[in-house]
Amino acid sequence: MITLTQEQRETIHKHAETEYPNECCGAMLGRFDGNIRVVHEILPISNQREDAAKYHRFLITPQEFLQCEKQARKENLELVGFYHSHPDHPAEPSQYDLEHSLPVYSYLIISVRQGKPERITSWILQNDRSQFNEEEIK
């Protein structure tokens, strides 16, 4: 399970709406409390994808990943997951998401239809990397 405040949801919604028709992306800092990921901070990240696939792919560079980890340590938090949007597609992981994700983290996906944020879901990759399991959002 992952916990998000209404304000955090709104931050993600606004980021997804602003970046449409391209994918947005960002990190979530918080704490692991057993199997629960408690989000304390949303860090919007600029999609570094520079090719025509930017509308349905995102890129977080290794340097940005490191910056997120540094920010988390600075605030005595942990990197608990990432979020990204699916413009004009369902809020479900794609094959690309499966191939580029890591176990442990939560992956929030927000569907954006014609520029308007819709459904938001969260997923955790199985340790064998074979598939995602949907997790509850509170």
Image: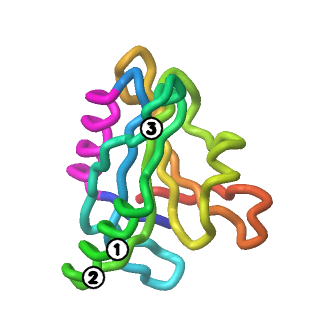
> Are dots 1 and 2 in contact, CB under 8 Å?
yes
Image coordinates of residue 106 in percent, x first then y, are 51, 62
Crowdedness of circle 1 by 10 Å Cα count: few (<14), some, many (20+)?
A: some
Placement of the C terminus among the 4 image quadrants: bottom left
User: Which type of secondary structure does the marked residue at label 1 adopt?
Assistant: helix
Q: Of 124 and 119, which appears nearest the observer?
A: 124
Please name which of the two marks, 2 or 3, marks the residue nearer to the observer: 3
Q: From the viewer's perspective, is 48 left or right of 130?
A: left
Please name which of the two marks, 1 or 3, marks the residue nearer to the observer: 3
Label at residue 49: 3
> How many numbered tags mark residues here?
3
Residue assigned mark 1: 69
Q: Amino acid at mark 1?
A: Glu
Q: Amino acid at mark 2?
A: Arg
Label at residue 86: none
Residue assigned mark 2: 73
Q: Of 134 and 126, which appears nearest the observer?
A: 126
